[in-house]
Image (spheres, rainbow, N blue to C red):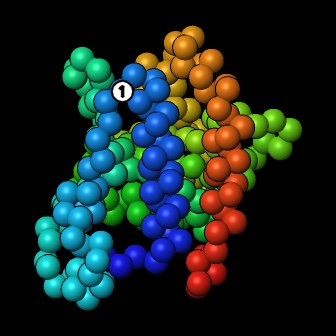
Amino acid sequence: MAFEFTNTLKGVVTQSILKALLERGGYRVTRLEIEELFSEIKHIDLQQYQSLNLPLQLRFLPDLLVAEVDMTHVFMVEVKFRSRFDEYSAHSLFDELERQRKYWEQSYAVIMIAESFVTDRQYHQDFIRVVRPQMHNILIDNNLSLEQRWNSLEHLQRVFKRFNNDKYIYDIQKSADTLTQTLKDLAKLQSPNGV
């Protein structure tokens, strides 16, 4: 579909960041989203896309298929970027994941933000979190502050266990500044409609 360029760019970059991180951690990663499987839809407008009557399962495919190197376990992963984790973004993320999980209930979501709640350091885990299947309700849990909700989400290495090795930890520490700066730069890109 002819998506708004800025949003397309943000999606492609954040998916590429996560794909690179996962591959560095030793995972096999394949792009899974409908735009990858049926690339022609990138060039049609919304009305044409809707007239295709694609099954909703295809329209809501997660972005990535992530597999253990020995193929013993796979994860379906949706990648989401937000400039900040605020009430609006928490609710929009919840709505999007709720809709997707009607069809892909075992999918995970990786959320990347440009503005961390932590201001005195720049660790990638302060900018990236994982929402496990069936856990997206935490995004709108009004009993928790926004920061508590964010901190209740999982770090990458708690879900993707291959990250818990010395080589990965060393690699990510070396590239953390680049990763966090890239996310901050993405937030500077403004859509024509101001989003």
- Decide: is 116 above or below 36: above
Is 64 or 6 nearer to us in this picture? 6
Q: Quadrant of residue 48?
A: bottom left
Q: Is residue 144 left or right of residue 162?
A: right
Q: Amino acid at mark 1?
A: Tyr
Residue at far right of view: 120
- Decide: is 119 above or below 71: below
Q: Which residue is rendered at x = 43% and y = 32% of the image?
A: 22
Q: Is residue 141 left or right of residue 100?
A: right
Q: How many marks?
A: 1
Residue 53, given in percent of the width and then of the height, sits at: 13, 77
Residue at far bottom of view: 47
Is residue 31 at least partly visible in the picture?
A: yes
Q: Which residue is rendered at x = 61% and y = 27% of the image?
A: 172
- Decide: is 174 above or below 45: above
Residue 37, given in percent of the width and then of the height, sits at: 20, 57
Is residue 149 at least partly visible in the picture?
A: no
Residue 113, given in percent of the width and then of the height, sits at: 62, 52
Q: Is residue 116 left or right of residue 41?
A: right
Q: What SS does tag 1 mark?
A: loop
Q: Which residue is rendered at x = 63% and y = 60% of the image?
A: 186
Quadrant for the C terminus, please.
Answer: bottom right
Quadrant for the N terminus, please.
Answer: bottom left
Q: Which residue is rendered at x = 63% and y = 41% of the image?
A: 179
Q: Which residue is mark 1?
A: 27
Residue 56, given in percent of the width and then of the height, sits at: 19, 66
Please tell me how crowded label 1 is: few (under 14), some (14-19), or many (20+) other residues with Cα within 10 Å: many
